[in-house]
Amino acid sequence: MPSRDFGLTETQRDIRAMAAEFVDAEIVPYARDWDRDERVDPKIVRRLGELGFLGLMIPESYGGVDADMLSYVLVTEELGRGDSSVRGIVSVSLGLVTKTIASHGSEEQKQHWIPQLVSGDALGCFALTEPGTGSDAASLTTRAVRDGDAWVINGTKMFITNGTWAKVALTFARTDETGITAFLVPTDTPGFTSREIHGKLGLRGQATAELVFDNVRLPDSARLGEIGKGLGIALGALSRGRISVAAGAVGLAQAALDAAVLYATEREQFGKPIASFQLVQELLADSAVDVQASRLLTHQVARMADAGVGPKQYATDASAAKYHASETAVRVSNNCLQVFGGYGFIDEYPAGKYLRDARVLTLYEGTSQVQKLIIGRALTGVNAMG
């Protein structure tokens, strides 16, 4: 049995195989062009919905798919292998938005939003990061002020995945000096605008945006969860989200390793394949061990979630998986480019895209430095984040 199959059920292997087939047929052949055009084909969203990939772990009563966290991780890894921009669509819309609505939403909110999100009729975005607040989410400045039975939101969000495609923005705003509250903001609400960010180093096909809230008026029924409890909702979502980022990083690293191995066996120098050179094999061997270690860390935290452990309890393990896998993606894609040599510098070959896409994985949903501080806090009991 291949090591990647060890411990998986037949259902889990079947889900991964379906995802791999989809990635090979409908993502890999187009990933380079999407990167060049800075735009993924919007039709891919409908396909993700049709295959159930936007509804994994969501109750069937809302149109979702009965699946466990490990199955979700397996699908996310395959999507990351194909194109991190597509993986990000799923990680954010399903992992951060739909799952949060399922966990914290009212029945009315669930009935209204979840069927649209799991089918691909709508996408969600997670509006937390601001121009002046990234890692320090608790200091966000977007405000929601109560006005009778309504709320009025003003502020700006930055680097928001799916921001120009989303129909609903899960938005976090300060409702008093110490409290943050979550809201489900329809993106067609007057006063809401989005601007796509171009010229990114990586994830160029992904719709990343700046969001502006200019007197956006919402009924209280748009509030998600209790007043002042939004930061806890956000942090719980991010703990879950780090699992999918880790899985996507594993997929990207696996793709880079596969490309490097193939190129090393085909490319000849000095009359023989470069795979016969010891230092090339060292690059490949180091990469393979890193990928497998990251995969095992990610699968472990997924299994913790499937065993009923809550986000607060597996948060440190999720940080460890996200930290190791994202840094692995950078190392392995860098090794891949080294194997390709000069050809790695042109986008006819995938090495450069892997490295560019990998680099942002160490930044979003908590930088590598933040993950280290979370791990350090768990080890020492001392909070070094202020």
Image: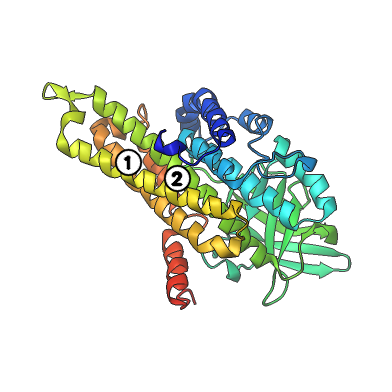
Which quadrant of the structure image shows residue 177?
Answer: bottom right
Which mark lies nearer to you, 2 or 1?
1
Calculate the distance from the C-alpha at mark 2 to the C-alpha at mark 1.
Answer: 14 Å
State the image coordinates of residue 305 (x, y, percent, origin top left): 59, 54
Q: Is residue 53 above or below residue 107?
A: above
State the image coordinates of residue 39 (x, y, percent, origin top left): 55, 34
Q: Which label is found at residue 288?
A: 1
Q: Is residue 253 above or below residue 129?
A: above
State the image coordinates of residue 359 (x, y, percent, origin top left): 40, 48
Residue in the image at 55% along x and 27% along y: 22
Circle 1 sits in a helix, a strand or a loop, which is it? helix
> Are the two marked residues, 2 and 1, in contact with CB atoms closer than 8 angstroms?
no
Which is more toward the observer, 262 or 386? Answer: 262
Q: Which mark is first along the chain, 1 or 2? A: 2
Question: Tag count in the figure?
Answer: 2
Q: Which label is found at residue 306?
A: none
Q: Is residue 381 above or below residue 353?
A: below
Residue in the image at 34% along x and 36% along y: 257
Is residue 237 at least partly visible in the picture?
yes
**Left or right of 274, for residue 163:** right
**Left or right of 204, for residue 89:** right
Residue in the image at 38% along x and 52% along y: 327
State the image coordinates of residue 179 (x, y, percent, origin top left): 69, 73
The residue tagged 2 is 249
Which quadrant of the structure image shows residue 149?
Answer: bottom right
Q: Crowding near pointer 1: few (<14 within 10 Å), some, many (20+)?
A: some
**Left or right of 86, for residue 59:** right
Q: Amino acid at mark 1?
A: Ala
